[in-house]
Amino acid sequence: MIPKIHPEARLEMREAARYYQQFSEQLPGRLREELNQAISNAVENPRHFPILENDWRKIRLHRFPFGLIYGKSGNELQVIAFAHHKRVPGYWKKRSLTE
């Protein structure tokens, strides 16, 4: 299965890494490792994680206050958001993967 990441989700990932960079040079790498593991877990077993709404699911990261919101379409894993737990729930619903 091929992961496709929405441009705004990719931006959220970069902003989070930049934020953690100010505290430690190691934190952005740890965030990326955990994020990559979450994407791998979703690719390996896409139906394992809790449903948020319709076919969108969420994987919570363990060491960081973020969740990866994704759905499966055919042979594609579609990552629509990398959401901080304090963000307004559902802010990502207006996004389209064709953007």
Image (tube, rainbow, N blue to C red):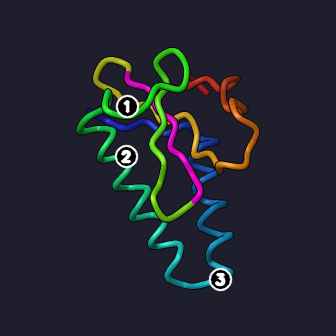
In three-dimensional space, the C-alpha distance between marks 1 and 3, rounded to whole angstroms, equals: 32 Å
Residue that numbered label 2 is attached to: 39
Amino acid identity at mark 2: Ile
x%, y% of residue 5? 49, 39
The residue lying at 65 percent from left, 48 percent from top is: 85
Quarter holding residue 35: bottom left
Secondary element type, mark 2: helix
Q: Observer-nearest residue: 53 or 80?
A: 53
Residues under labels 3 and 2: Cα distance?
A: 25 Å
Q: Is residue 21 magenta?
A: no
Q: Position of residue 42 (x, y in %)?
A: 33, 39
Q: x, y (%) of residue 30?
A: 45, 71
Q: Are marks 2 and 1 in contact (CB under 8 Å)?
A: yes
Q: Is residue 46 left or right of residue 23?
A: left
Q: Is residue 63 above or below residue 96?
A: below
Tell me, for residue 23, which label it has, or none: 3
Q: Position of residue 97 (x, y in %)?
A: 55, 26
| Lower position in the chain sequence, tag 1 or tag 3 | 3
Q: Which residues are magenta?
A: 65-72
Query: In this picture, is 23 found above or below 7?
Result: below
Report the disc number at residue 77: 1
- Label 1: element kind: strand
What is the three-letter code of the residue carrying label 3? Phe
At x 43% / y 36%, what residue is drawn?
4
| Main SS of residues in magenta | strand
